[in-house]
Amino acid sequence: MALGGRATRKQIAAYFGDDKYRLDILLYIPNKPGKPVAGFVGLNFNGNHTIQSDPGIIKQGGKDETHGGNGETRWQVEMLIDHGYALATVHRDEIDPDNNLDATKDSI
């Protein structure tokens, strides 16, 4: 249960091959409908824990951001749940880290 009982929070670890290819998916599903619901899917920029001040969200990747952080006003999780929508998000760096450590001089 999350958001005062209005939603169920799920945190799903998806592996693609071995442990180094892992996505941590944060999913909120409204409890009220009791049937399949439409949802929004999006990438977040600072870690799943920054989209909502829910202390139950696993803090990711050593980010210094607090729960909620600067992303809470952008994501409007409670409004989505109150309108009957689900939400799924993944931190973008888990898909492709924003660094040049693997870049080569021939890369575009």
Image (cartoon, rainbow, N blue to C red):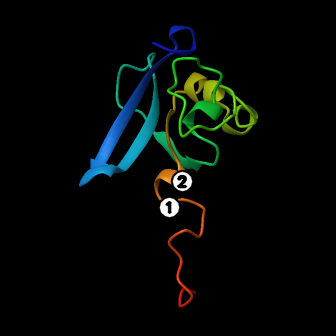
Q: CA distance from mark 1 to mark 2?
A: 5 Å
Question: Of residues 106 and 95, which is closer to you in this image?
Answer: 106
Question: Of residues 41 and 104, which is closer to you in this image?
Answer: 104
Check the image and report above or below for 33 versus 50.
Answer: above
- Quarter of the image for residue 17 reads bottom left
- Quarter of the image for residue 76 reads top right
Pinpoint residue 49: horizontal percent, then vertical percent: 59, 31
Q: Amino acid at mark 2?
A: Asp
- Spot the residue most to the left: 17
Pinpoint residue 103: horizontal percent, then vertical percent: 53, 77
Check the image and report above or below for 20 versus 46.
Answer: below
Give the side of residue 5 with respect to residue 70, left or right.
left
Quarter of the figure with the C terminus: bottom right
Question: Residue at coordinates 63% horizontally, 27% vertically from top-left?
Answer: 52
Q: Which residue has dot 2 on it?
A: 93
Question: Residue at coordinates 69% horizontally, 33% vertically from top-left?
Answer: 65
Question: Residue at coordinates 51% horizontally, 18% vertically from top-left?
Answer: 56
Question: Residue at coordinates 59% horizontally, 70% vertically from top-left?
Answer: 100
**Disc 2 residue crowd, few under 14, some 14–19, many 20+, Cα 10 Å:** some
Secondary structure state at the residue bearing disc 2 = helix
Check the image and report above or below for 33 versus 90.
Answer: above
Exactly how many numbered labels are in the figure?
A: 2
Secondary structure state at the residue bearing disc 1 = loop
Asked if the residue under mark 2 is in contact with the one under mark 1, i.e. CB atoms within 8 Å, the reply is: yes
Pinpoint residue 83: horizontal percent, then vertical percent: 58, 27
Q: Which residue has dot 1 on it?
A: 96
